[in-house]
């Protein structure tokens, strides 16, 4: 009888300790594109020249809880509250409830307890971004191997967002492109008008071979990132 009572007491204490380790999540401010405030959002904007040829490729950043945009935009350089390449065109607000912010090994809420601890953890959303920011302040930027998508992926892995430790350039891009919301009609125009103009000029001066070349260019880009991410991981690791 005493053993049962002792076990119940331990269970209650463990439950209380776990609750104590959970972080209270205060309400976020409203998203305000006019002030470039996107609390806990993944944001996207088209790139000059590159997005004119491949409109699915763009520049991404991750926002802090107060809505400040943080992005990796050059070697040893992290932008804070000054989104590179223009204003936000698409965004998706992420759910902090899907993050794992452990204060110790026993308080992990994700299933990757040891892997998460080994790769680096965070105690809050902003802490994950700050830690990743310090890491990327000493990294060389490369559009094909270590870029803004890599920065966001590292942040999400530190949070174990969605219970996953496998965030990378490909699924970060897919997340914002498939689930992202447009800021407004002009954001759509800004993203696709240059591409449309390039296609029209290409067909006018070169003809249909231009479209074939453009398609091959896009397929090569997709193949590089997919193969590099899943087959040549060491090459694309930041």
Image (cartoon, rainbow, N blue to C red):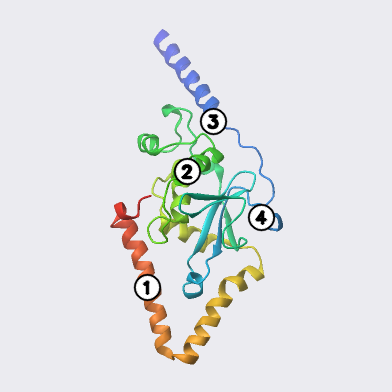
Q: Please tell me which of labels 2 and 1 falls first in the chain.
A: 2
Point out which mark residue 22 bears: 3
Q: Residue at x 66, y 52 (%)?
A: 37
**Mark 2 residue element:** helix
Q: Please tell me which of labels 4 and 2 falls first in the chain.
A: 4
Q: Quadrant of residue 92?
A: bottom right
Residue annotated with mark 2: 132
Q: Please tell me which of labels 3 and 1 falls first in the chain.
A: 3
Q: From mark 3 to mark 2, how far is it between C-alphas?
A: 22 Å
Residue annotated with mark 4: 36
Residue annotated with mark 1: 219
Q: Is residue 161 above or below residue 10?
A: below
Q: Residue at x 62, y 73 (%)?
A: 189
Q: Is residue 1 visible?
A: no
Label 4 or label 1, whichever lies nearer to me, is 4
**Mark 4 residue element:** loop
Q: From mark 3 to mark 4, how far is it between C-alphas?
A: 30 Å
Q: Is residue 50 visible?
A: yes
Q: Where residue 14 sits: x, y (%)?
A: 47, 21
Q: From mark 2 to mark 1, how far is it between C-alphas?
A: 31 Å
Q: Where residue 171 sits: x, y (%)?
A: 43, 57
Q: Please tell me which of labels 3 and 4 falls first in the chain.
A: 3
Label 3 or label 4, whichever lies nearer to me, is 4
Point out which mark residue 178 bears: none
Assess disc 2: are there few (<14), some (14-19) or many (≥20) residues with their C-alpha within 10 Å of its C-alpha: many
> Do tag 4 and tag 2 residues touch (Cβ < 8 Å)?
no
Q: Please tell me which of labels 4 and 1 falls first in the chain.
A: 4
Assess disc 1: are there few (<14), some (14-19) or many (≥20) residues with their C-alpha within 10 Å of its C-alpha: few
Label 3 or label 1, whichever lies nearer to me, is 1
Q: From mark 3 to mark 1, how far is it between C-alphas?
A: 45 Å
- Which is more toward the observer, 160 or 75? 75
> Do tag 3 and tag 2 residues touch (Cβ < 8 Å)?
no
């Amino acid at each position: 009888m005493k053993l049962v009572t002792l076990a119940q007491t331990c269970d209650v204490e463990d439950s209380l300790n776990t609750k104590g380790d959970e972080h209270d999540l205060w309400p976020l401010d409203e998203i305000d594109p006019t002030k470039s405030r996107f609390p806990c959002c993944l944001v996207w904007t088209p790139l000059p020249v590159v997005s004119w040829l491949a409109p699915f490729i763009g520049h991404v950043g991750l926002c802090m809880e107060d809505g400040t945009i943080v992005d990796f935009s050059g070697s040893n350089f992290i932008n804070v509250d000054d989104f590179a390449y223009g204003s936000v065109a698409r965004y998706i607000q992420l759910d902090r409830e899907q993050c794992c912010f452990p204060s110790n090994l026993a308080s992990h809420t994700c299933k990757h307890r040891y892997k998460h601890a080994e790769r680096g953890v965070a105690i809050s959303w902003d802490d994950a971004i700050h830690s990743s920011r310090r890491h990327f302040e000493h990294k060389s930027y490369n559009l094909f191997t270590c870029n803004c998508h890599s920065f966001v992926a590292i942040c999400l892995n530190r949070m174990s967002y969605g219970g996953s430790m496998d965030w990378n350039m490909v699924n970060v891009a897919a997340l914002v492109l498939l689930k992202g919301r447009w800021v407004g009609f002009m954001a759509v125009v800004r993203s696709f008008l240059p591409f449309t103009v390039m296609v029209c000029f290409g067909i006018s001066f070169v003809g249909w071979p231009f479209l074939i070349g453009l398609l091959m260019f896009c397929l090569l880009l997709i193949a590089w990132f997919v193969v590099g991410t899943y087959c040549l991981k060491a090459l694309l690791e930041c």
